[in-house]
Amino acid sequence: MEYKDIEIRLEKKGIKATANRITVYRALASAHVPVTLSMLEEALVTVDKSSIFRVLSLFLEHDVVHAFEDGRGVLHYELCGNEGHCDLSDSHLHFYCESCQKSYCLDDVHLPEISLPQGFTSHSISFVIKGICPHCQARQ
């Protein structure tokens, strides 16, 4: 993804493009799977962990990324496909492979509409299915 394209996407989300933000965005875009802070830290050796974390926190606040916990307490981040504000209709299932410890988006499996009791307001939703991915099953 080109610098100018990332700059435009960030501006549409209300974020000023900086070198670190563009670097983190590019890494997220090229990953094609949800990534952890540790994975980004390994991929971006020129950017310190605290800077990556600050960028991810800003991205979360402005709906640039979605985050989900994989059941081990580790957050995974993925880019939001919407250019504007995200809502619950953007949610989808995730699969965590207990063998290779990778997380996968199940984009074609959307979450059902959930009616909360009166007084409850949701801002995000996450479902993670745990098991063994096809690649690991083929190796066994």
Image (cartoon, helix red, strand yellow):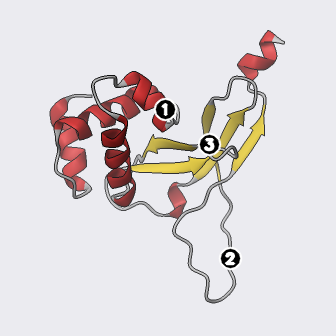
Give the mark nearest the N terminus, 3 or 1. Answer: 1
Of the residues shown, which amino acid type is indicated by label 3?
Asp
Label 3: element kind: strand
Quarter occupied by the N terminus: top left
Question: Going by the image, does 15 lie left or right of 122?
Answer: left
Give the mark nearest the N terminus, 2 or 1. Answer: 1
Name the residue at 63% across, 29% down: 102
Question: Residue under circle 2?
Answer: 115
Q: Which mark is residue 38?
A: 1
Closer to the camera: disc 2 or disc 3? 2
Quarter occupied by the C terminus: top right
Q: CA distance from mark 2 to mark 3?
A: 22 Å
Quadrant in the picture for residue 44: top left
Question: Residue under circle 3?
Answer: 108
Name the residue at 32% across, 54% down: 58
Of the residues shown, which amino acid type is indicated by label 2?
Ser
Q: CA distance from mark 2 to mark 1?
A: 35 Å
Label 1: element kind: helix
Closer to the camera: disc 3 or disc 1? 1
CB-based contact (under 8 Å), mark 3 and mark 1: no
Q: Residues within 10 Å of mark 3 (few under 14, many from 20)?
A: few
Quadrant in the picture for residue 3: top left
Of residues 106 and 43, the one nearer the viewer is 43
Q: Residues within 10 Å of mark 2 (few under 14, many from 20)?
A: few
Question: Going by the image, does 26 lie left or right of 43?
Answer: left
Spot occupied by residue 104 in the image (x, y as percentages of width and height) = 61, 34
Depicted 84 relative to depicted 8: above or below: below
Quadrant in the picture for residue 51: top left
Of residues 73 and 70, the one nearer the viewer is 73
Of residues 59 and 39, the one nearer the viewer is 39
Depicted 50 relative to depicted 100: above or below: below
